[in-house]
Amino acid sequence: MAKFRVVYCGSNDVPVDLIEPILRDADAEMVIARPTNDEELAEAGRDADGMIFHGALPLTREIISKLNRCKVVCRTGVGVDRLDLEAAREHGVTVCNAAGCNSIEVSEQMIGLMIAISRKLVRMNQYVREGRWRRHTAELHSYRGPVSRIAGQTLGIVGLGNVGRQVAPRAQGMKMNVQAVDPYVAPEIAEAMGVKLVSLDELVRTSDVVSLHAPLVPATRKMFGKPQFAAMKKTAYLLNCARGGLVDTDALYEALTTNEIAGAALDVTDPEPMPADHPILTLPNVIVTCHTAANSNESYVDCQTHAAREVVRVLQGEPPTTEINDPWLVGEAQDQGFGGV
């Protein structure tokens, strides 16, 4: 009989070939569970020594209270807005994530979305598919609308964490000026990157592109609403590859329809999934990419194996490398409902 029992929870095609060898080397048995509600999740972890979460699964105080011997829970993703970190700490459960494992992917998607929305690539592709292309006619340029050179523009990064620090050099490589707001980053880190730290108000007012990479906590929920959109340049674009709840969707829709800002590219939305009949999806100056920024073949392998190794480290009495214990995050669980995967 194995020394440890590790339960993998998710509705995905579980990569047993990636995870099981890591657990087996630690004398841990891998058990696969596919919970669809809080009760099933609690039952799956009742006798687990460790758990791996794939997808938007909750870790509520009630669920934690039913985990008889669980020492560690590790997400294969990054966001912890469905996890009650304070309750986990009180019950001696270490919570980890896959921070850094998909930062490259998200930063690449952000750059791609910035180019796509500002260069009107999706709009022009649709123009061609509609059979309207007649060389460079006045009608074509009117349909496309104004386009500005990206080089020389100012990118404002909200959150200079793992992803933000990948975004900055890529934008600088495109000859953009980069500024950021992050109350928790050391000034010397930003300075070494050539990134100017500014206030949120200054960033909103002076950026040509605003890219969100902040966690979702009470202080950041709907941090971009009517006042922020009113303060932005009318030529500015908003990008969100972090959490949909950072943006007031109704206020964004109003800003887009009244030309307060030029456009938005969203990998994440609120609500999520975004209903097909949502009015924001009728707008030509919006791109939505259904929460896929973190995905690639490589990041999937990295995130899955990282989660397994973190669980093993804790079970063997070693410190994890990506434990979630930031004081400003503990006690800030947001979405307690079962989100599925």
Image (tube, rainbow, N blue to C red):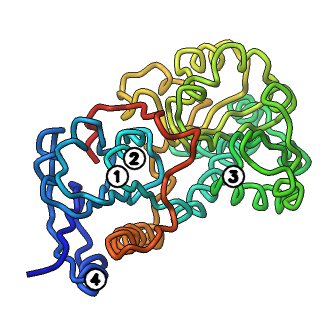
Along the line of sight, which residue is nearer the eye, 111 or 77? 77
Residue corresponding to mark 1: 92
Q: Secondary structure at mark 3?
A: helix
Horizontal relation, residue 166 to residue 253: left or right: right
Between the residue at mark 4 and the residue at mark 1, the CA separation in whole angstroms equals 21 Å
Tag 2–tag 3 contact (CB < 8 Å)? no
Q: Secondary structure at mark 2?
A: helix
The percent position of residue 158, horizontal first and vertical second, equals 70, 39
Residue corresponding to mark 2: 89
Quick one: label 2, few (<14), some, or many (20+) residues within 10 Å?
A: some
Between the residue at mark 1 and the residue at mark 3, the CA separation in whole angstroms equals 31 Å
Tag 4–tag 3 contact (CB < 8 Å)? no
Quick one: label 1, few (<14), some, or many (20+) residues within 10 Å?
A: some
Earlier in the chain: of badge 4 and badge 3, it is 4
- Which residue appears at 34% of the width and 52% of the height? 92
Name the outermost residue toward the bottom.
Answer: 25
Residue corresponding to mark 4: 26
